[in-house]
Image (tube, rainbow, N blue to C red):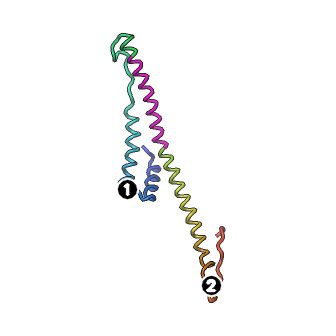
């Protein structure tokens, strides 16, 4: 399951992107269910006598099936890790969106502060103060 702080960041990001609440909850539930199901239902090993007790038939077939199951287990472990990494990626994305928003807000504040300097002159008002990065 995604940690609570990751879930909150993901939710806030999707709200900021105007993703509706039902879709957000559906995505969060999907991530949780997928990771939990994969971890809770490992593929069991295949007993050597599953397909009979002869070496050439049953034992070899069971060995080959077990080898295939091992490969599938390894791939499922990668999927689980990918689902966990997705939470981290969403957190980084959310932080980037927040930083970009803060930078854009700061820039717009500078522009707004300078508007009086480029407005049509009015000799009855005080001179404008050009904004700087320091304040």
Q: Where 104 falls versus 62 (above or below)?
A: below
Q: Residue at x 50, y 46 (%)?
A: 88
Q: Where 8 falls versus 73 (above or below)?
A: below
Q: Earlier in the sequence, mark 2 or mark 1?
A: 1
Residue 69 coordinates in the image, percent (x, y):
41, 26
Residue 102 coordinates in the image, percent (x, y):
55, 62
Secondary structure mainly formed by the magenta segment: helix
Q: Nearer the viewer, residue 3 or 28?
A: 28
Q: Nearer the viewer, residue 82 or 41?
A: 82
Q: Nearer the viewer, residue 78 or 32?
A: 78
Rendering quarter of residue 54: top left
Hey, which residue is sitting farthest bottom in the picture? 124
Quick one: SS at disc 2? loop
Marks 2/1: CA distance? 49 Å
Q: Where 117 falls versus 77 (above or below)?
A: below
Instruction: Confirm whether the magenta stretch covers residue 38.
Output: no
Left/right of residue 96 with respect to residue 130 in the rendered view? left
Q: Which residues are magenta?
A: 61-85
Q: Which mark is residue 38?
A: none
Left/right of residue 9 with respect to residue 58 in the rendered view? right
Quadrant into which the N terminus falls: top left
For disc 2, the neighbor class at 10 Å (few under 14, some 14 to 19, many from 20) is few
Q: Give the residue number, with chain letter if any, for mark 1.
A: 21
Quadrant into which the C terminus falls: bottom right
Residue 14 coordinates in the image, percent (x, y):
44, 55
Quick one: SS at disc 1? helix
Q: Give the residue number, with chain letter if any, for mark 2.
A: 121
Hey, which residue is sitting farthest front in the picture? 120
For disc 1, the neighbor class at 10 Å (few under 14, some 14 to 19, many from 20) is few
């Amino acid at each position: 399951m995604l940690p609570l702080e990751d879930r909150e960041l993901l939710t806030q990001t999707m709200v900021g992107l105007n993703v509706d609440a039902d879709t957000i909850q559906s995505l969060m539930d999907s991530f949780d269910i997928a990771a939990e199901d994969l971890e809770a239902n490992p593929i069991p090993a295949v007993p050597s006598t599953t397909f009979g007790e002869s070496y050439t038939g049953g034992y070899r077939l069971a060995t080959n099936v077990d080898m295939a199951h091992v490969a599938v287990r390894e791939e499922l472990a990668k999927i689980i890790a990918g689902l966990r990494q997705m939470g981290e990626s969403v957190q980084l994305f959310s932080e980037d969106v927040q930083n970009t928003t803060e930078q854009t807000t700061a820039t717009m504040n500078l522009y707004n502060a300078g508007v009086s300097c480029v407005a049509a002159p009015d000799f009855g008002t005080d001179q404008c103060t050009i904004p700087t990065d320091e304040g």
